[in-house]
Amino acid sequence: MGKIPSISQRFTGAIQATDQAQRISELQAEVEKLRSSQSPVLEKQIEALRSQLQEQSGEQDIEVSKIQANPHQPRQTITNESIQTIARSLEKDGQITPLIVIPQDDHYILLDGQRRWEAAKILGWQTLRSVIAIMPDDLHRKALLTFIHHEDLNPLDKAEAIFKEVADATSMGTEGILTVLATGLRRLERQKQTSQLTSLVTATTEEQISGLQRLGVNEAEEKLLLVLLGLALNPTSVKANLMPMLSLPNDLKQAIREKGLKGAHALALSVLSAKALETSEKIASKERIKATEQVLSEELNVAKTRELVAQIKAKYIKSEHSSSKQIISIQRSVEKLSRENIANTNLEQIKDLRALFQQKLEEIESILDLIK
């Protein structure tokens, strides 16, 4: 990526504009473009743009109660620990950076600064310094572009935000998106054309359209792939790394959101399913939760996590095979125990046998209650 021009070069035209709302809109658009660029000077550029917004709209003290979270915010995971950290900083040093908000009716929508806003509520602050931007035409897309290429945006939040954008643009449901994406990519892979698809990520919209037509994709595939390419996303990577996040069990999604579990670790742990372990979902869930706690407490890497998962699976498979052989043998012995055999046995042995069977039946019942 080439060097980003200086702020003064990028905004000469915007600053000279006569309409204040137009200037703010242009500056806001540049904020979003820079945030998706991953430039090494990104944060300095954003701070400079914040200053430009401040000059145009002025800095205001806005009531915390009148500020609302962006309903299209891609970042759904904001840990209590991170908010507490911001709260301590605000309490000690005060508010250094103003929020960026969008006026709507009698309240304001957050475009930037959600953790500062959450921290201020904890501290009981009544107002926060903010600068005003105007409402973009497509708030969800703008918010998505703002966050989508941030390295600290976890893959679950990213997958859900991308899915919403694709669903809105294509009118497909979850299953439809997954099916169309998987089917199209499998065909391109068989035809050894995935590299041609990947090359379209950095192409213009016109080049992407003509490129997809050359690849022979159908209408539904083209519509879906254009959305992903328009977000500068590699569809193959989305399918492999992000879409599986949507089907994670709830305990793993919760661990990602609340405990900082990484996406790759969650995918490894998701192998511990009821089907793979050939047990009930209740037992599989307990195994996943226990394994997740071990991964987090011992800070296991992905390779070690996979080793742990393999050990748990082996335990179930080994236990099942050995138990099955033993139970089959017992079943055959019981079947051979005829009424005549029992009748020819002394009374004490019959009573002992009955007591043994009763005990084993109780144990069987307790196991059945556990796996229901």
Image (tube, rainbow, N blue to C red):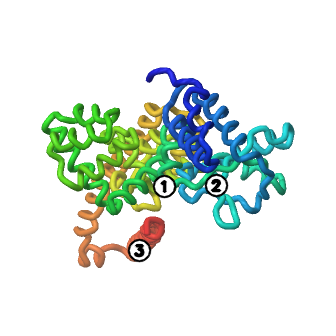
Q: Residue at x 45, y 56 (%)?
A: 249
Report if the CB atoms under discs 1 and 2 are less than 8 Å apart. no
At numbered mark 2, what does the secondary structure look like: helix, strand or loop? Answer: strand
What's the amino acid at mark 2? Answer: Ile
The quadrant holding residue 356 is bottom left
What's the amino acid at mark 3? Answer: Arg
Q: Residue at x 53, y 33 (%)?
A: 300
Residue 86, x across and y down, in percent: 75, 42
Which numbered disc covers residue 354? 3
Estimate the spatial distance between the alpha carbons at disc 3 and disc 2, rounded to whole Å. 77 Å
Nearer to me, 272 or 67: 67
At numbered mark 3, what does the secondary structure look like: helix, strand or loop? Answer: helix
Estimate the spatial distance between the alpha carbons at disc 1 and disc 3, rounded to whole Å. 74 Å
Q: Residue at x 57, y 26 (%)?
A: 9
Residue 31 falls left or right of residue 196: right
Residue identified by numbered label 1: 138
First in residue order: circle 1 vs circle 2: 2
Name the mark nearer the viewer: 1 or 3.
Answer: 1
Residue 16 falls left or right of residue 199: right
Nearer to me, 170 or 4: 4
Which numbered disc covers residue 7? none
What's the amino acid at mark 1? Answer: Asp
Residue 73, x across and y down, in percent: 56, 53
Whether residue 35 can be seen here: yes
